[in-house]
Amino acid sequence: MISDFQFLSAGARRRNIAFTATTGDTPRRMVATVVPPAVQLMPVDAEADVRELAREQGVPVPAVLAVCTDISYIGEPFVISEHIGGETVPRKVLRTLAASGNAVRTAEQWGTAMARLHTVDPAAAPEGVPAAGADPAAEHLAEVRSVVETLLPDRPVFALALRWLEKRLPGPPERPALIHTDMRNGNLIIDGDGLRAVLDWEGAQRFGDPMRDVAWPALRMWRFREDAYEFGGFADRDTFVRGYEQAGGVFDLDRYLWWKVMGTLYWGAGLAQQAAAHLDGTVRDIVMAASGRRVSEIEWDLLMQIRPRVKA
């Protein structure tokens, strides 16, 4: 018997629904993640496999209980996972950490979780996980350039940022890694004791630059008005990097700063894509529709990062 349904999020891409499954006299809380095919970044069974691979490496990830790729049941594929208590809504996360005083400990745990992922052999990743290629930075820049030229051709700040990135393009990473691509405040389960789990593995990639992963959660849009704390609005860079390096991660400042600008540009292009998807009917959703109004915020962030003589 299943009961006690609760919608957990209003994400732009997926629906997460908590429920209780009772077998005999034993209830168990679970979460179903429903993934519309139109926005599926990788097959749900491959995503489940990479989650389990990360969990085996010591990354805190909710255990996968079942996977269904047959859309005849509910019209869309889905994954069922164990339910882990805690906060995921960023402002609630910040309030929880402020009340508990555990922000530093949580930031170190976060860095440790990312480093453990980056020490996984990329060759062990499931076949359904996208491979970033031999030169992840150059390939990612080319992809984003295409979106900017299509959807934002009249925005000079984006053109300036593209030139900045091209001029400073790093070579391939010395040690490619299996990367999450979205391990930021909002995709973490956190309670007063610290980090409970990492969520949303749909964008995981093999052979990526680990500094892409490290830079992404440091972008201003993931600080939620707490700009004094670079990582997630509750941690400084040194604290996060300390946890990352203690667990075997190798931090490269120059590559990190490049990926920070790249990530900001990528998010601006992504916002434009989300708005376009709503307008053309691909994904009719108010969250997608509202994304377009934030493109101007990204222009400000880009200018603050690439202006001369100012550290990003």
Image: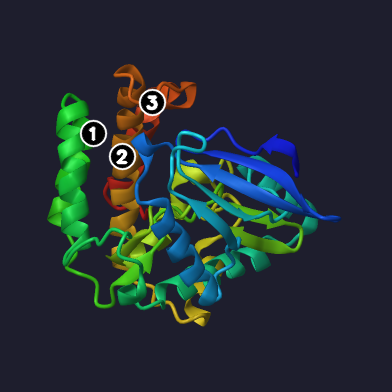
Pick out the residue farthest to the right. 25
Residue 111 position in % (x across, y down): 52, 68
Q: Are marks 2 and 1 in contact (CB under 8 Å)?
A: yes
Amino acid identity at mark 2: Leu
Residue 33 position in % (x across, y down): 54, 45
**Mark 1 crowd level (few <14, some 14–19, many ≥20, 10 Å Cα):** some
To which quarter of the image does residue 288 belong? top left
Q: Can residue 243 be seen in this view?
A: no
**Mark 3 crowd level (few <14, some 14–19, many ≥20, 10 Å Cα):** many
Residue 147 position in % (x across, y down): 20, 36
Q: In this view, does 311 lie above or below 272?
A: below
The answer to whether 221 appears left or right of 1 in the picture is left
**Mark 2 crowd level (few <14, some 14–19, many ≥20, 10 Å Cα):** some
Q: Which residue is drawn at 32% across and 17% down?
A: 279
Query: Mark 1 sits on what residue?
Result: 157
Amino acid identity at mark 3: Val
> Distance of mark 2 from mark 1, alpha carbons?
7 Å
Report the mark closest to the observer, 3 or 2.
3
Query: Mark 2 sits on what residue?
Result: 303
Report the mark closest to the observer, 3 or 1.
3
Query: Mark 3 sits on what residue?
Result: 283
Q: Helix or strand or loop: what does disc 2 sit on? A: helix
> Distance of mark 3 from mark 1, alpha carbons?
28 Å
Residue 184 position in % (x across, y down): 50, 53
The answer to whether 299 appears left or right of 244 in the picture is left
Placement of the N terminus among the 4 image quadrants: top right
Q: Considering depth in this image, is 78 or 278 the residue closer to the camera?
A: 78
Q: Helix or strand or loop: what does disc 1 sit on? A: helix
The answer to whether 67 appears left or right of 145 in the picture is right
How are the residues colored? rainbow
